[in-house]
Image: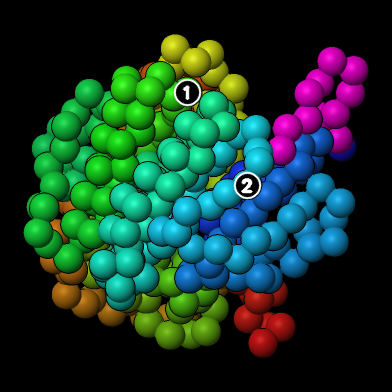
C-alpha cells in the first residue's frame, strides 16, 4: 500500500548502509511510503541479495560508494546507517570501522550542511559500553573501554554522536540521534557472528549452539519491523528534538534463555557448547524507552518468540536455497 496521496510530500531520501540488514528494510519502508531512495553502500557487510527486489524499481537508486570519501548528491533527508555492526566484522578491520563512523559522519554531515537538510544517525547501545546502571537511560554517559577490541566501534559511534551534536550547536544543523539496541530479523547475514543468526543457523544445521561464557549475560532483542517504525517516527519529530533517543525492546533475556528458545522453535537436537567470553563483552543490556514512548509515541510490538519464528523461517529458506 502506498501512502503517497493528497497533501503528502514524497522526498528523495539517502540511506547510507542501505544494502545491510536494517538499511534494506528501511529502504523498503521508505519506498512503501512513496519516497524515492538513494541507497549508498560499499558492500562491506551488506548484500546485493537484500536489495535485489528493489533494483529496477523507479523510486530506487543504488550507488556503490564508501562514505569515508565525500559524497556529492542532491537529496532531501539522510539516514546514516553505514557501519559494520557485528563484532567479528567491525573488529576485522578496526581502522576502517572507526573511519567509517568518524570520517563517514563528517562527510554525511558536510553533505547535510551544504543542502541544509535533516540527518539521522544510527547510533548504538554500545555507547553505554558495559553499563553500570540498568536499564540504560539516555542521560547515562556510559562505561566504555577506550582502547579495547570493541572500542573501534563504541568510540567511533560516540565520536559520531559528538560530531552530530557539534554540527547541530555550531551550524544549527537539523539532526537526530537514535541509540539502537540489539536488533534481529530476516536479512541478517548467516555468517556475521551475531548471536541470533549464529544460534538459528547452528540449530538448523545440527551444529552445537556456541554460548560465550556461562550464558548469563543479557541482551534485549528488537525485531526489525519495530525498529524501522521507530526510525521513521524519529525522523518526523519536530526539529527541537535531536535525541539521543533509545530504540529497543526492553524484554531482556540471558543468552542461555535465547539458546533454549531457539532449540525449542527449531525442534533441533543441537547441543550447547560453552566458549570463552570475548573481551569487554557487556554483562547486561536493556533500554529504558520512556523517551521514545513519550516523544515518538513508539513501543515495540513484536515479542521475541514471534520475531524468532519469522527469522527461523527466513534462515530455513536461505539454507535450503544453497
Ligand atoms: P549491517 O552490517 O548489515 O549493515 C551495515 C551496512 O553498512 C552494510 O550494508 C555495509 O556494507 C555498509 N557499510 C559499512 N561500511 C561502509 C562504508 N564505509 N561506506 C558505505 N557503506 C558501508 O548492519 P546493521 O545491523 O544493518 O546495522 C546498520 C546500522 O545500525 C549500523 O550503523 C549499526 O551500527 C547500527 N546498529 C545496529 C544494531 C543491530 O543490532 N543490528 C544495533 C545498534 C546499532
Ligand atoms: N554470543 C554468544 N554466542 C554466539 C555469539 C554471541 O553467546 O555465537 C553472545 C555474545 O558474547 C554477547 C551476546 O551473545 O554476550 C550478543 O552478542 P552479539 O554479537 O549478537 O551482539 P553484541 O555483543 O554487540 O550485543
The answer to whether 184 appears left or right of 132 in the picture is right
Q: Which residue is mark 2?
A: 73
Task: Give the mark nearer the N terminus: 2 vs 1.
Answer: 2
In the rendered view, tell whether residue 183 sits above or below residue 93: above
Q: Is residue 288 visible?
A: no
The stretch of residues the image draws in magenta is 2-12
Q: Which residue is mark 1?
A: 174
Tell me where residue 72 appears, x and y as whole percent: 58, 49
Tell me where residue 313 appears, x and y as whole percent: 66, 66
Residue at the spot x=25%, y=43% of the render? 159
Is the residue marked by circle 1 packed among few (<14), some (14-19), or many (20+) residues within 10 Å?
many
Give the secondary structure at mark 2.
loop
Residue 7 painted magenta: yes
Residue at the spot x=12%, y=42% of the render? 143
The answer to whether 299 appears left or right of 288 in the picture is right
Q: Nearer the viewer, residue 110 or 160?
A: 110
Residue at the spot x=54%, y=26% of the render? 116
Q: Residue furthest right?
A: 6
Residue at the spot x=37%, y=76% of the render? 209
Tell me where residue 222 appears, x and y as whole percent: 47, 44
Tell me, yes or no, whether the two marked residues, 2 and 1, touch with CB atoms within 8 Å. Answer: no
Q: Is residue 122 visible?
A: yes
Q: How far apart are the alpha carbons under marks 2 and 1?
A: 18 Å
Q: Nearer the viewer, residue 255 or 47?
A: 47
Amino acid at each position: 500500500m502506498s501512502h503517497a496521496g493528497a497533501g503528502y510530500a514524497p522526498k528523495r531520501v539517502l540511506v547510507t548502509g542501505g544494502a545491510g540488514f536494517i538499511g534494506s528494510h528501511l529502504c523498503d519502508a521508505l519506498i512503501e511510503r512513496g519516497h524515492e531512495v538513494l541507497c549508498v553502500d560499499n558492500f562491506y557487510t551488506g548484500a546485493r541479495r537484500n536489495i535485489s527486489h528493489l533494483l529496477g524499481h523507479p523510486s530506487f537508486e543504488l550507488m556503490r560508494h564508501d562514505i569515508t570519501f565525500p559524497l556529492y548528491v542532491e537529496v532531501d533527508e539522510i539516514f546514516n546507517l553505514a557501519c559494520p555492526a557485528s563484532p567479528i566484522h567491525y573488529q576485522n578491520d578496526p581502522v576502517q570501522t572507526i573511519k567509517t563512523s568518524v570520517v563517514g559522519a563528517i562527510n554525511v554531515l558536510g553533505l547535510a550542511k551544504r543542502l541544509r537538510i535533516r540527518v539521522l544517525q544510527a547510533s548504538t547501545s554500545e555507547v553505554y559500553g558495559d553499563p553500570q546502571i540498568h536499564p540504560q537511560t539516555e542521560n547515562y554517559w556510559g562505561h566504555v573501554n577506550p582502547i579495547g577490541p570493541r572500542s573501534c566501534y563504541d568510540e567511533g559511534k560516540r565520536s559520531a554522536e559528538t560530531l552530530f551534536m557539534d554540527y547541530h550547536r555550531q551550524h544549527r544543523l537539523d539532526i537526530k540521534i537514535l541509540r539502537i539496541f540489539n536488533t534481529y530479523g530476516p536479512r541478517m547475514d548467516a555468517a556475521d557472528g551475531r548471536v541470533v543468526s549464529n544460534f538459528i543457523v547452528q540449530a538448523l544445521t545440527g551444529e552445537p549452539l556456541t554460548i560465550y561464557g556461562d550464558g548469563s549475560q543479557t541482551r534485549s532483542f528488537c525485531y526489525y519491523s519495530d525498529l524501522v517504525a521507530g526510525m521513521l517516527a524519529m525522523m518526523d519529530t519536530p526539529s527541537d528534538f535531536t535525541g539521543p533517543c533509545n530504540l529497543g525492546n526492553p524484554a531482556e533475556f540471558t543468552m542461555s534463555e535465547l539458546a533454549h528458545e531457539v532449540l525449542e522453535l527449531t525442534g533441533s537436537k543441537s547441543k550447547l557448547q560453552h566458549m570463552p567470553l570475548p573481551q569487554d563483552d557487556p554483562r547486561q543490556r536493556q533500554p529504558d524507552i520512556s523517551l521514545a514512548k513519550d516523544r515518538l509515541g513508539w513501543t515495540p510490538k513484536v515479542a521475541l518468540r514471534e520475531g524468532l519464528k519469522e527469522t527461523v523461517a527466513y534462515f530455513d529458506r536461505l539454507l535450503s536455497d544453497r
